[in-house]
Amino acid sequence: MTKTQRLHELIARIYERQQFTVDELAEEFHVSYRTMLRYLQELSGMGVPLYAEPGRGGGYSLLNQAASRRVQQQPGLFSRCIKPMTHIVGVEFKAPFTAVYMARVHMPAVWETLMKREHEIINVVDRTSYVGVALSRSHIYHYVAGIEVTHPRAVPEGMISITLPPREYAVYNHAGAVGRSEVDDTYFYLLDKLRKQGLDHDPNAYTLEVFDGAKLKELTVYIPLKS
């Protein structure tokens, strides 16, 4: 496993656990205490909101205020559905995993480009619905801001098409702002709820973010489940 892959696995584990010690993660990832501490310092420098709790019983916790508010204010219910094969055409964004937080800066521009050029996409299923397709569990963070189509034909220059196979998803209605950090909070909050109910998400499949309306204000998150 490369260092980039290890950091990728580590950040996913941090968001799943929320609270941990350096010793616990060092043992889990089979590295020394000093190496794990260095990894955590690197992640903090990348923008992962870690908070060090001093004292004998201290450790690290994830500063996740938005997710905490949602836990307190919402029942947090999700549903499950099997989504048929889906074709998306849109504008893609790629970045090394170690620069995944660049997405918070670049994502608005990706969506703006799509909005300006959406009239070029043909065979559209619904002109009032937009789909973000994300994969962040490999060495590359991949995101497509797009529109669902019946057939991915005549893809406009500079855009791509992506076909997702039929699969089961956990579906959750996001509340609040739809900035990248707020959506990420909802994503990891839902992962925690799935884990507590004995369900496993599939980290090798794409997550869907379905927006209702051109202003991208109403969002439903689809988390792929393992079969």
Image (spheres, rainbow, N blue to C red):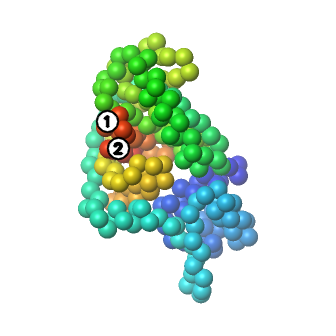
Which mark, residue 213?
1
Judged from the image, the secondary structure of the residue bearing numbered disc 1 is: loop
Position of 180 relative to 69 (above/below) = above
87 left or right, relative to 47: left
Image coordinates for residue 221, horizontal then vertical, percent: 36, 45
Residue at 59% in and 87% down: 56
How busy is the neighbourhood of tag 1: few (under 14 within 10 Å), some, or many (20 plus)? few
Give the residue type at disc 2: Lys
Residue at 31% in and 30% down: 128
Placement of the C terminus among the 4 image quadrants:
top left
Residue at 64% in and 47% down: 99
How busy is the neighbourhood of tag 2: few (under 14 within 10 Å), some, or many (20 plus)? some
Image coordinates for residue 199, horizontal then vertical, percent: 36, 54
Image coordinates for residue 114, horizontal then vertical, percent: 47, 28
206 left or right, relative to 37: left
Do tag 2 and tag 1 residues touch (Cβ < 8 Å)? yes
Position of 133 relative to 178 (above/below) = above
Label 2 and label 1: CA atoms lie apart by 7 Å
Position of 177 relative to 134 (above/below) = below
Asked whether 42 or 201 is in front, the reply is 42
- Quadrant housing residue 210: top left
Residue 71 can be seen, yes or no? yes
Image coordinates for residue 190, horizontal then vertical, percent: 38, 55
Asked whether 122 or 41 is in front, the reply is 122
Residue furthest bottom as drawn: 56
Judged from the image, the secondary structure of the residue bearing numbered disc 2 is: loop
Give the residue type at disc 1: Gly
Residue furthest top as drawn: 154
Residue at 35% in and 44% down: 217
Which mark, residue 112?
none
Q: Which residue is mark 2?
A: 217
